Image (cartoon, helix red, strand yellow):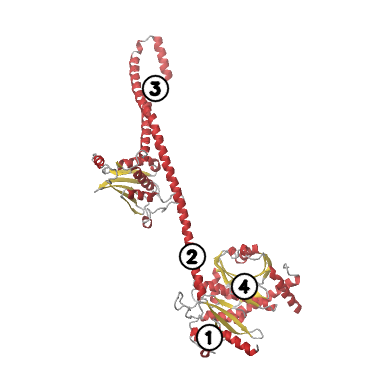
Amino acid sequence: MNDQHNTLLADFIVERLELGVFAVDAQFNIVLWNRFMHTHSGKSAQSLKGSNLFTTFPELPESWLKRKIESVFELGNYAFTSWEQRAYLFRFKHNRPITGGVEAMLQNCTFLPLKDEKGKVEFVVITLQDCTDNALIQQRLAEAITISDEERRKQQELIVKLEDAKNQLFQSEKLASIGQLAAGVAHEINNPIGFVNSNLGTLERNVTDLMKLMAVFESKEAELPEAAQQELRKIKKDIDFEYVKEDLADLINESKEGLGHVRRIVADLKDFSRVDQSGWQIADLEKCIDTTLNVVSNEIRYKATVVKEYGHPPLVECIPGQINQVLMNLVVNASQAFPERGQITLRTGEEGMYVWIEVQDDGVGIPPENLQRIFEPFFTTKPVGTGTGLGLSVCYNIVRKHEGELTVRSEVGKGSCFRILLPIFHGKMGESEELEAALSVPQ
Amino acid sequence: MIKGLNEDQTAALQELANIGMGQAGNSLARIWKEFVHLSIPRIAMVDASRLPDLILGFVGDTAVSASRQAFHGGFRGEVLVVVTAKDRNGLAQLMGFEGQLDAAEREEVLLDIVNILGGACVGGIAQQVSAEIGFSAPSLIGEDLDPLDVINPEQLAIDTALSLEVCFQVENRSLTAHLVILLPNNEVGALADLLDQFLCTL
């Protein structure tokens, strides 16, 4: 190939390559403008030769682009722009008139110094590469990565929730076992308590009888010979007979009280766990409340004063063990609403075919944005590890299962009020006569 | 003395770097029309594991942005530019950016800086030893990084590198940028040959 061939080849490459190529001199006058630039700008090389780049294309970012081209003239090194930071240098139509997806052709540009024999930069040649297709693929990849990251994050969250649920299940299984154990123990304790109680009654009668005998005996004491009297006085003094006499009655009374306490605890435990009767029953909700309060009294004693405003509603067909669980959750939650100490008010009443229970506290209240979510499973405002966020959602489900409603109203700074609404009659007990009979029992 | 270079070569390299940076300063001053001061380049052989400390050493404990660019030809290596957030907007103005920068422009500033500073400094040295040097497109390392996170030694392809660090100051604007030229140690031989050729011409 001779020089003429070389020139022809170079011209051909510059003209026909699918690459924008143009060049400017140090005054930013256009000295080269290839076919690609002609096609996309609509301006021919002939019309542009010698004209100023920035006068011809006033939309170009002049201040920045001048600096960039100047630096190539000065330093004699390449410079670059990338579509990722600067979408395009010239706003050309993209190559996707049908499939679209971008607003303009995305371009990677390279600024090349064209030097004379002495190494001085004479022209800066700028190439424009259409990156639209690659860019679209890259953008789609980036989106896919974002989506997969998001999914992975959700999975992580689910794993944590599953772990929580497992712990909760484990916890409730444990509670159920403890409940059964407690009920079993309560049952076992009942027998000895029975005979201790009966023996204590007998003991009390016997002591009274003995005391009667002693009184008569003491009134006749003066009639005994002096030596015998002296001996009796000595024994009485040694055993502090006067004190023993008084103390006997106290001892028996205190034992009876203590025993009564034990019997109440045992009865509450049995009532609360309802191991013996777990199905639908006719129950007195006020009695359910009392039982629950006894069971949680230790939990709330130092946090809240409990006020009962009972409206004596009719008996209700329900699963008392589950209603107790709801009440316990609501009361314990209420007791945690106070910064220091507060008041929990428990109300009951009747409304048409329904009975309602309200558990109200004068604590911190629930912000409106949380109020919508408190019955959602796993929603909790307690510190990580303290609450599972399942308590209220379990309550909600129990009440729904009873075809009732669990609602809440709350004001920040004033407190919250949870209201359980339960239908009186379900027909789940089968024998309607039995139910009617039960319901007709006067309060 | 630098490992891989003899005493003469080490002295020549330091001298060439000094002259090269002087030329770079002149070129930058002509482009930016501001007086640019360059520190005397510090040249050392550095273990890859020490590079994070090196960067912390010249910027101090502050959030930085960084970009890199590869060069090839007579000798191969990479240029790293580290700037603090405080200086970035001022540098953007120098490079002709106008108005409030958006996220993409902030990135482009970093790419332009490494291209200009790297071009000026590597070009300055290459010119002294009559080597032809070309540059690949620059890329971003990251924005608002801990200085220790600019380079992760575990991801480097080299154990040791010849480092040449320079600090730029644009006087009237009190702007600062830091530049490190890194040559993998297996390129030191090529540099030594170029230095020998240069010494022969003296």
The chain identifier of the residue carrying mark 2 reads A
A69 versus A232 height, above or below: below
Instruction: Measure the alpha-carbon separation of dots 3 and 2.
Output: 86 Å
Instruction: Measure the alpha-carbon separation of dots 3 and 1.
Output: 125 Å
Mark 2 lies on a secondary structure that is: helix
Question: Hey, which residue is sitting farthest top in the picture?
Answer: A225
Q: What label does residue A146 carry, if any?
A: 2
Q: Which residue is mark 1?
A: A35
The mark closer to the camera, 3 or 2, is 2
Q: What label does residue A244 carry, if any?
A: 3
Q: Give yes or no for contact between labels 3 and 2 (Cβ–Cβ under 8 Å).
A: no
Instruction: Measure the alpha-carbon separation of dots 2 and 4.
Output: 29 Å
A233 versus A331 height, above or below: above
Foreground pick, B93 / B147: B147
The mark closer to the camera, 3 or 1, is 1
Q: Which residue is mark 4?
A: B70
Mark 1 lies on a secondary structure that is: helix
Mark 4 lies on a secondary structure that is: strand
Residue B151 place in picture, x, y as percent: 60, 65
